[in-house]
Amino acid sequence: DADVTQTPRNRITKTGKRIMLECSQTKGHDRMYWYRQDPGLGLRLIYYSFDVKDINKGEISDGYSVSRQAQAKFSLSLESAIPNQTALYFCAVGQLYEQYFGPGTRLTVT
Amino acid sequence: QKEVEQDPGPLSVPEGAIVSLNCTYSNSAFQYFMWYRQYSRKGPELLMYTYSSGNKEDGRFTAQVDKSSKYISLFIRDSQPSDSATYLCAMSEGGSEKLVFGKGTKLTVNP
C-alpha cells in the first residue's frame, strides 16, 4: 500500500536500448518529479510536471524524455541508453518543500 | 564553489549521543531549507523543512538556519541505532521548483 511506487525496481539493459521507468502515486498530488542519484553527485532533477499538460525540464534532461499519462502516472524514458545513465532513479510527488519519494529504480546500462 | 556543500562523513557515534549535521551554501536567494533521511536501498524521506532563518523542533530533531552565515544544521538528540542513515540537506529559492541537494552525510549510531 505504498503511496509512490516505481517499476521496475532493478533493471539491466544494453547500450542503445530504449527503456521506460514508471511511477504511480496514490497521494493525489498534482506535482511529480524525476531525479537521478549518483555517488558523489547527490540527487539531481531530470524533469518535473505540474499536471498532465505541463512538463518542464530540470537540471539534467538531455537524453531523457517523460510522459504524464494521468494525474497519478509519470514515466521516464531513455530513448537510447548509454553507460553514464547508470544510476539510481527516484520519482517524487508533492509540492516543492514537501516531496515524497518512491523506493527507486536501480538502472545499469552495460 | 558548489551551491550546497555537505560533509559526506561517514560519522559514527555511540547510542545516546547528540549528533550535529551541517550544510553550507553559496546562493543567498535560498529561502526554503529541508532535511531528508535516506535509509540504505530506500528513497529519501522528508524529516523537516524550514522557511528562512530560525529554529524548528520536532521530537528529537532540531533544524537551524543561519542565513547570515549561509549555514544550516540538523541536531539529533538521544541518537538511536534506528537513526543510522544518510542525511541529505536540500534548499530552494522562493518560487523555484528546483531543489538543490547536498551529497549527504552517512551516519552510524552504534548500540
Image (spheres, rainbow, N blue to C red):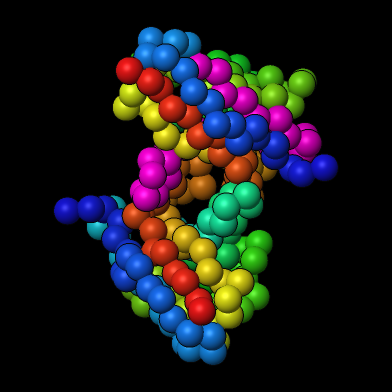
Q: Majority secondary structure of the magenta segment?
A: strand
Q: Position of residue B28 (x, y in %)?
A: 77, 34
Image side of residue B12 versus residue A10, left or right: right
Tell me: residue A56, above or below residue B19.
below
Q: Position of residue B11 (x, y in %)?
A: 53, 26
Residue drawn at (39%, 58%) of the image: A104
Residue drawn at (38%, 44%) of the image: B40
Residue drawn at (57%, 52%) of the image: A39
Numbered-mark total: 0
Q: Nearer the viewer, residue A1 or A13?
A: A13
Q: Position of residue A108 (x, y in %)?
A: 47, 71
Q: Position of residue A88 (x, y in %)?
A: 47, 60
Tell me: residue A62, above or below residue A45.
below
Residue numbers of the magenta segment: B19-46
**Rendering quarter of residue B27:** top right
The residue most toward the left is A1
Image side of residue B92 versus residue A99, left or right: right
Residue A48 shows in the view: no
- Is residue B87 within the magenta segment? no
Residue drawn at (71%, 30%) of the image: B24
- Is residue B30 within the magenta segment? yes
Tell me: residue B63, above or below residue A39.
above
The residue most toward the right is B1
Q: Nearer the viewer, residue B14 or B86?
A: B14
Tell me: residue B62, above or below residue B34.
above
Image side of residue B60 versus residue B28, left or right: left
Residue A45 shows in the view: yes
